[in-house]
Image (cartoon, helix red, strand yellow):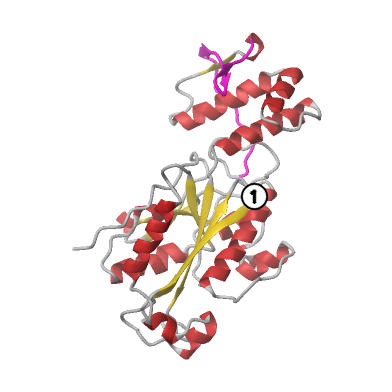
Amino acid sequence: MEDEQTLQPGDKAVAPARWASPGSECGDEAQRPNPEKKQWCRLDGQETKASTLITSSANDFSDPVYKEIAIMNGCINRMSKEELRAKLSEFKLETTGVKDVLKKRLKNYYKKLNYYDYICIIDFEATCEEGNPPEFIHEIIEFSVVLLNTHTLEIEDTFQQYVRPEINTQLSDFCINLTGITQDQVDKADTFPQVLKKVIDWMKLKELGTKYKYSILTDGSWDMSKFLNIQCQLSRLKYPPFAKKWISIRKSYGNFYKVPRSQIKLTIMLEKLGMDYDGWPHSGLDDSKNVARIAVRMLQDGCELRVNEKIGLMHAGQLMSVSSSLPIEGTPAPQMPHSRK
C-alpha cells in the first residue's frame, strides 16, 4: 500500500557493470587483501594449480564472508584462460570470449551461489479514510506475499488473506473504492494474529530460512515500519524478528538507475521499465506481483537487490538504513512472535 512517507536517505548510487565486492549493491570489483599469510586457493573444494597461489591476511576482513569472497576473486583473477574455460565448462557455462569476460562470467556464477534463493515480496492494505487524518488508526486488512525464485526469476507461489479489523470495523467508502476490498470480505476474515500464523506456516512449508536463503522485499518502508509495527502493537504481539530487515525496492531502484526519489512510485517504475500495471492498483496481491516484475527486471539488468532498511525496535520503531558494505545475510526462519505483556 502506497504512503507518501519520506524515506531515509539512501546509499550512493553505484554502477552495476562489474563484479560486486563483498556487501556492495551493484558495486565495484573486490580488492585483494594485503599479503601476509600464504594459503592455497580452492574453488568448489578443488585445489588449483600453483599459478593460482594467492596471499591473504586474517586481519583484512572481520566477517568470514568477506574473506571467502576476496579469496575467490583472487583465485579467479590468477587463473589462466584455459583454467577459466575448464571451470566454466564444469558448470556448463559458456566458454567463449576474451579472458576478462570469462573471469566476470565465473565470478558472477560464484556470486549467485551466495545470494538469496528466494525473495518474499510483501504488501499490506490497511483501513484508511480520505485525506488520511493524523489521528486515524490504520489496521491491516489484506496480507499478501509473492514468492520469487531468484534462480528461475519466476513467481513460484503466492499467499493472500484478508484480515478483520477490530478497532475501525466498518470500512469507509474511500477504502473500499481504493482497495477493492469489501465489507463482507473483512467481516468473514480472521483476525491479524490468526492470519500472521497462517503466513508463518506457509513460509515454513517453503523452508525459508532453513533450507533456503531468503529476504523480504517491499515497495517502500511503510509496510514494515508503519503498518506492521502499528498492527503488532494493536494486536499485542511483539514485532516478528523475520520482518526486522527488508529490501526497499524504491531505494534500490533509485540507487541503481540513478532516479530522483520524486520519480519513484510503483506505476512510474513500471512505466520507466516499459511495463504497464497489471491488475487492480492497491490490491495487495496485485501490487506484490507488479513489484516482483520490477525486481525481476532489476536482477536481469545486473542489480544485486539486498537488504537496505530495518526497523530499530530499540529506538521506538525508528526506520533505519542498512549499509551496503555489510555482507549479504539471509532472513531468519519465520517464527510466531510472543504476545506483549
Q: Which residues are magenta?
A: 26-49
**237 lies above or below 25:** below
| Residue 96 located within the stretch drawn in magenta | no
Q: x, y (%) of residue 2?
A: 53, 72
As helix, strand or loop, the secondary structure at mark 1 comes to: helix
Q: For residue 290, say whether it is visible.
A: yes
Q: For residue 32, say whether it is visible.
A: no
Q: x, y (%) of residue 93?
A: 71, 32
Closer-to-camera residue (21/141)? 141
Residue at (67% x, 46% y) in the render: 302
Tag 1: Cα neighbours inside 10 Å, few (<14), some, or many (≥20)?
Answer: few
**In the orientation shown, which residue stands out farthest toward the top?**
50
Rendered-image quadrant of the C terminus: bottom left
Residue at (28% x, 60% y) in the render: 238
Q: Is residue 222 left or right of residue 28?
A: left
Q: Amino acid at mark 1?
A: Leu
Residue at (55% x, 50% y) in the render: 11
Q: x, y (%) of residue 53?
A: 60, 13
Residue at (52% x, 27% y) in the render: 68
| Residue 45 located within the stretch drawn in magenta | yes
Closer-to-camera residue (255/273)? 273
Task: Report the residue marked by disc 1.
Answer: 299
